[in-house]
Amino acid sequence: GSAGTIFDDRTAGADYDIYRASAGGLNLLRRLKTEAEAVCGIIVRQSERGTFVPRFTEIKFPGPEGFRSPEIDCGGRVLSLEGRIDRVDMLEKNGVKYALVLDYKTGSVDAGLAKIGLGTNLQLPVYLAALKAAGYTPAGAFYFPVHNRENRDYRLKGYVLSDGGIPFEMDLYLANSGESMVSEGVKVIKSGALKKSRSVLSGEEMEEFIRFGLQMTRRACAAALAGERSVYPVKDACRRCAYGRVCGFDAERGRIRGSGRINGVGDLAKIVEN
């Protein structure tokens, strides 16, 4: 059935009576239904523009279909990472099995390299590592912005592999339109070649992207196993934290974690070295 019909079926039970009991609650349900219909419509249209096919939702690693856990070595102690990926889209081309990961975000979306460099947004590279461990070629990693705003832009925000013509497989109209309507930051120049962008990664850059995610995860795990408890927050983190009295961090004088200037994936390696 349609997204609206499915929404009505899922919210028909007694658990939602509290919302139907007031005008405000009914308005909230109507807004959620409108948003669900819009998002589902976007997902269908994005899929129709390309050759990738949604294959898995809420897929666990380790799990079925050969999904394995990436492993990290923390000073001789091997740890297996576990997780759940919101969605995996796949394409087999010239004998290569490509896979995209998508993570749905209802709040603000920041897929910038600065956040990844800080070690706060390691989700996407770790997901790609899980796909790679399962034998797939990582073709991209994205956040899907689910929000309720005017002038919605539901284009995927993240990183796509340039090799194998993947950006053109994601959006078959890219060559003619000049800019992808599926993924943000993907454009072509007059010659028809991809425009250089932080969002478009070569095979080597994609490998570095994944490697950095695992290296930073390894560093965090090693610190935890060693009993590291130093307080080293990122900028503005203390504004949203309710445990200031517990950690005793002085937001005005304390040391704030920063990643420095990051112009591309290649700069991530410098962070690990430093």
Image (cartoon, helix red, strand yellow):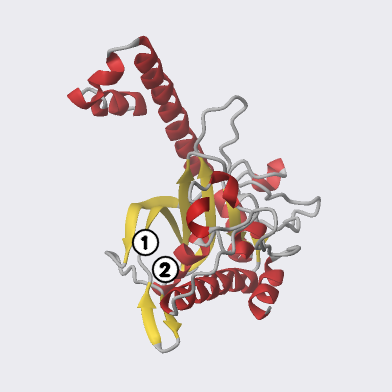
Which quadrant would residue 232 be assigned to in this image?
bottom right
User: Are discs 2 and 1 less than 8 Å apart at CB?
Assistant: yes
| Residue receiving disc 2 | 130
Q: Residue at x 35, y 15 (%)?
A: 26
- Comparing 104 with 244, the one in front is 244
From the top left corner, tell me how far across and down residue 218 is, in percent.
49, 76
**Image quarter (top left, top right, bottom left or bottom right) of the C terminus:** bottom right
Instruction: Please tell me in which quadrant of the rendered image residue 136 appears.
Output: bottom left
At 35% across and 24% down in the image, what residue appears?
Answer: 4
Give the residue number, with chain letter if any, for mark 1: 83
Task: Identify the secondary structure beneath mark 1.
Answer: strand
The x and y percentages for residue 103 are: 46, 50
Which numbered disc, 2 or 1, marks the residue closer to the eye?
Answer: 1
Depicted 49 relative to depicted 192: above or below? above
Apparent side of residue 141 relative to residue 269 in the rendered image (left or right): left
- In this view of the protein, can residue 27 be seen by the observer? yes
Q: Can residue 171 be seen in the rendering of this structure?
A: no
Pointer 2 local density, CA inside 10 Å: few below 14, some 14–19, many at least 20? many
Tell me the SS state at disc 2: helix
Q: Amino acid at mark 2?
A: Ala
Nearer to us in this view, 274 or 60: 274
User: Which of 255 and 170 lies nearest the eye of the viewer?
Assistant: 255
